[in-house]
Amino acid sequence: MDYFAHESSYIDEGCIIGKGTRIWHFSHIFSGSNIGESCTIGQNVMIGPDVTLGKECKIQNNVSVYKGVTLEEGVFCGPSMVFTNVFNPRAKIKKMDQVRKTYIKKWATIGANATIVCGVILGRYSFIGAGAVITKNVPDHALIAGNPGRQIGWVCNCGESLTKKLTCVICKKQFKKGDNGLTALSSALSSKII
């Protein structure tokens, strides 16, 4: 095995799990899931079925990643954050044919106890604050907080808030606004930052 799975975890047949991935206590990986290399799956996590995680994702404790959710590389899901996959579920009515796809782009961060309502796209390097409720698409590098989630600023690739001039005080990277959020222009430390 090229990955580590704690003896209390359960991995269904038909999963693809990348080299260097670590799966911790009481987690369940459903059939058809595709987990990239060097991911960390925390305690009591459910992945799948038919979920894709890019390389280097980190899923903290008590997170369920349901069918219809795709995470690109480097996505961080904080403890007990929530994904949904059907907009108006009922216990006695089967609605899995109504799954709305949710797409989390590379290096996005979702804080602890945040809720991502199905059918949205979170942009690259976006940052969802703890407890936020996301009901619509989020631009690249946007900082979102509250219920319902609203943009309160911008963040750098390194996760730090940007100044009003769209500069990171930590890594000195400079950004410009575009159609889908921000785009990086330059960085004095670009070789050290993602």
Image: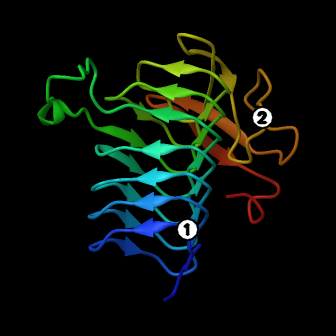
Q: Position of residue 46 (x, y in %)?
A: 45, 51
In terms of depth relative to the viewer, which is nearer, 59 or 143? 59
- Report the disc number at residue 189: none
- Residue 76, above or below 35: above
Quarter-of-image position of residue 162 = top right
In the picture of the structure, the residue carrying the numbered disc 2 is 167
Residue at 35% across, 29% down: 118
Residue at 51% across, 73% down: 37
In the picture of the structure, the residue carrying the numbered disc 1 is 8
Near mark 1 (Cα within 10 A), the count class, few <14, some 14-19 or many ≥20, is: some
Q: Position of residue 53 (x, y in %)?
A: 43, 58
Disc 1 residue type (three-letter): Ser
Callout 1 touching callout 2 (CB < 8 Å): no
- Residue 89, above or below 173: above
Q: Residue furthest top?
A: 148
Q: Residue furthest right?
A: 170
Question: Depth-wise, is mark 1 or mark 2 nearer the camera?
Answer: 1
Position of residue 127 in the picture relative to residue 160 (left or right) = left
Q: Position of residue 153 (x, y in %)?
A: 68, 21
Upstream in the sequence, badge 1 or badge 2? 1
Disc 2 residue type (three-letter): Thr
